[in-house]
Image: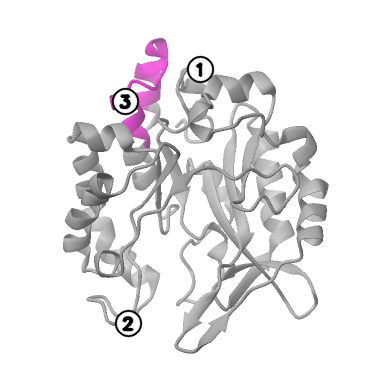
Amino acid sequence: MIYTNWMSFIKDDVRLTRLVIPGAHNAGSYGMSAMAECQKDNLFVQFEHGIRQYCLRLNTNRRGEIVLAHGITKGDLFENALKDIKKSLDMYPDEFILLDIREYYPQKFGPITLTYKADKNKVDALLEKYIQPEKYAFCDFEHINDVTVGDIRKSGKRYILINENEDYKFSKSCEQILPWEKNVNGAKAKEFANETLRFFDDYKTDGLYWFQTQQTPNLGTQVGVTTPARLDDDLVNYFDTIINGIATTPRYLERSNIIAGDFMTRDYSKSRAILKLNLLKGNVKPELEKEYEEGLV
């Protein structure tokens, strides 16, 4: 299998915004309560399943430590996630990743707004300790649409640290879009699988296109309040519907980029389906296409 080194098969001239990249929605929610958990395994296991884009949301625990967060739920220490990232990059030197890191965004509940804090200096210190942004963060670009796979390879850098406010040293504010609609993402699995594809028509960007393949539990929607795991148990049966819809619609295939989901390490089926799109887009080195395709089996 090639899930640990699939990026080495990609052509140098492929723009990052055209590359199809498996992502992990709420990548740091592993080990949380059932209502908050969207991934079962840590970031190293996710990496081994082909994931190269992680959204990590931060908060602070009672001991003043920076932790991974999903809303009010606090999870693993941020430094443990960084250890996994370091381990991944050390073991697989031909790969690079997209790290989307920020404090968990404010949440409104009627008249109450909950805010989440992660001291920037502490975050910077942890980043420097484990993954050395000064040495390994790629930030020599004006617009993310100009960046190619070859640019990152030639630079010797290993990741892009994405933060819309550039809160952290060597972080970059990259144009990106994350389509989400309450009624669509809260629909039953079959309806969601068909309806969410229209996002490719309704939402456009020259930056990173972050397409989510998971439903969202929410009051006032078809799925209501339930756990992400229960939703995924149904949605996994329609995942191929989503990917086939992309594969067979040229304009959707052209816009496909980051394709993220819940429970990406359930098995290899989600990453396999997503990574096959790189073949259809002509992103794989011609001499390695057969090996790439066979490695996804």
Amino acid of disc 1: Asp
Tell whether 93 sits left or right of 133.
Answer: left
Distance between the alpha carbons at the discs numbered 2 and 1: 45 Å
Residue under numbered circle 1: 12
Q: Quadrant of the C terminus?
A: top left
Amino acid of disc 2: Leu
User: Along the polypeptide, which appears first: circle 1 or circle 3?
Assistant: 1
Question: Mark 3, residues whose alpha carbon is within 10 Å: few (<14), some, or many (≥20)?
Answer: some
Residue 47 vertical position relative to residue 4 in the rendered view, above or below? below
Determine the residue positioned at 74% across, 58% down. Answer: 79
Q: Secondary structure at mark 2?
A: loop
Q: How many marks?
A: 3
Tell whether 26 sits left or right of 88.
Answer: left
Q: Which residues are magenta?
A: 275-294
**Disc sitting over residue 219 in the figure:** 2
User: Along the polypeptide, which appears first: circle 2 or circle 3?
Assistant: 2
Q: Residue 267, percent across and down?
A: 40, 50
Residue 5 vertical position relative to residue 290 in the rendered view, above or below? below
Residue 127 vertical position relative to residue 230 in the rendered view, above or below? above
Residue 48 lies in the magenta-colored region? no
Residue under numbered circle 3: 281
The reply to whether the C-beta atoms of the residues labelled 1 and 3 are less than 8 Å apart is: no
Residue 277 lies in the magenta-colored region? yes
